[in-house]
Amino acid sequence: MTQHIETALIHAGVRDGFANKKGAVNVPMYVSSTFHQESIDEFGEYDYARSGNPTRDALEKAVAELEGGVRAHAFASGIAAVSATLMLLSQGDHVVITEDVYGGTYRFVTKVLPRYGITHTFVDFTDLAAVEAAITPKTKLLFLETPSNPTLGITDIRGVVAIAKQHNCLTFLDNTFMTPLHQRPLDLGVDVVIHSATKFLSGHSDIIAGLTVAADEQLGNDLYFIQNSFGNILGVQDSFTLLQNMKTTDVRFSRSCESAQKIAEFLDANPLVEQVYYPGLDSHPGYDIHHGQSTSSGAVLSFRLPTYEKAKALVEAMKIPVFAVSLGGVESILSYPAKMSHASMEPEEREKRGITEGLLRFSVGLEHVDDLIADFTQALEIAEKA
C-alpha cells in the first residue's frame, strides 16, 4: 500500500522487523562496537559498528524510503555527507557547482578538492545556459543547492538534470532547506540527495548529523565504500535521536513554513528592509520554478538591511530568536551569514553572492507568529535609528 510521506515519517525504518525483534514501538539502541560471530567461516550481518549498526541501518532505511531512493547513509555531520559525495570524484575530474552554496561546501571544494587534482567552476545555477557553458569534457558532476544558502536562489532541478544527462554527468543536490516532505529531488531525476539532518529533519538543535540518499544501487554502494573507508559515521545514540525527531517533521516544518510566509510578507512591507529573499513572495525571481518542484516555500528567509550598524542593532534588539549558527530548530534562529555560515568565504566572494554586511538569515521556529512579528517590529524601530 502506497502511503503519504506524513505516514512514512512515523513508521519508516521501524516496522520491517530487521532491527526490532521484540515488538517495541521504537527501534532499540544497539550500543555495541562489535558483534559476536557464530562461525569462523561465515560472519553474520554485523561485525564492527563502523561498517554497520542495526540502529543506524534503521535510520538509513527510513531516510531512503522518505526520499524514494535505493540506499541512504548517515554521517557524523552535514558537511561529512557533502564531503563523502564529493570524494566519489577522482583526480582530473571537474565539478560545476552553484555559486550560492553553503560556506562549508565552498571551503571543501576550494581548499580540499584541489589537493587531489579535482577542479571546479562556480556558476549562477539560475542561468541554465551558464551551467551548460561551464561543462567541459572533464566535468563529472553538477552540484545543486536549492533553495540556496543564504540568499534562497532557486535552481530549475528538471532543467539541470536534463543538461546533466545530455553531457553524461551526475547531479547531487543539497535538500536541507526543504526536506523530503516538501521537495523530492530523486523523483525529478537527481542522482544523490544530501541533507544536513542537524537542521529540519532533527529539528531540536540537539544533534549534528548528515545524510545521503542515492537513486541507484551502484552509487549507494560507492557511497558506502566512502563512508566505511573514512569512518565518518553517525553514532548510535544520534541515529536513535534522529529517528525519533524525524517523526514530527511534518507538524514542525509545516507550521514553521506557514509562519515564515507571514514574516516574509511583513518584512517585505517594511521600508527599512531593502530586500527579502524568500521563494514564497511572488516578487522572487524563482517563484514559479520553485513552486513547480516543491510543495511549500520553506521555513528559512533572508533579508538585507542598509548597513552593518543597522543589522547589528536589530540583532541586539531581538528578544525571541536565538542568535546562533545553524537553522531548522523548534526555536527561531537569527544568523549573520558573513560571520557565521559563510565566514570561510573570502569577502570579495561573499560580496559577489549578495552576502552583504547588512544580510541576516532567519530560520523560523515554532513560536507564535504574532510574537515573532511583534519582536521584529520593535527591533526594526531600534535599527532604524542606528
Image (spheres, rainbow, N blue to C red):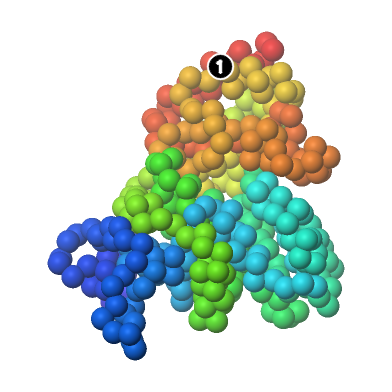
Quarter of the image where the N terminus is located: bottom left
The residue tagged 1 is 317
In this image, 267 relative to 242: left or right? right
Quarter of the image where the C terminus is located: top right
Q: In the rendered view, tell whether residue 47 sits above or below residue 113.
A: below
Report the residue that reaches farthest toward the top: 385
Q: Can residue 27 be seen in the rendering of this structure?
A: yes
Q: Residue at x 77, y 54 (%)?
A: 110
Q: How many numbered circles does the render carry?
A: 1
Circle 1: element type: helix
Q: In the rendered view, tell whether residue 103 sits above or below residue 124.
A: above
Q: Can residue 126 be seen in the rendering of this structure?
A: no
Q: Quadrant of residue 383?
A: top right
Q: What is the crowding at mark 1: few (fewer than 14 residues within 10 Å), some, or many (at least 20)?
A: some
In this image, 254 relative to 158: left or right? left
Q: In the rendered view, tell whether residue 383 sits above or below residue 133.
A: above
Q: Residue at x 46, y 24 (%)?
A: 320
Residue 125 position within the rendered picture, expressed as x and y whole percent measured from the top left: 73, 59
Q: Amino acid at mark 1?
A: Ala
Q: Residue at x 55, y 81 (%)?
A: 218
Q: Nearer the viewer, residue 208 or 63?
A: 208
Q: Quadrant of residue 21?
A: bottom left
Q: Nearer the viewer, residue 386 or 117?
A: 117
In this image, 325 relative to 113: left or right? left
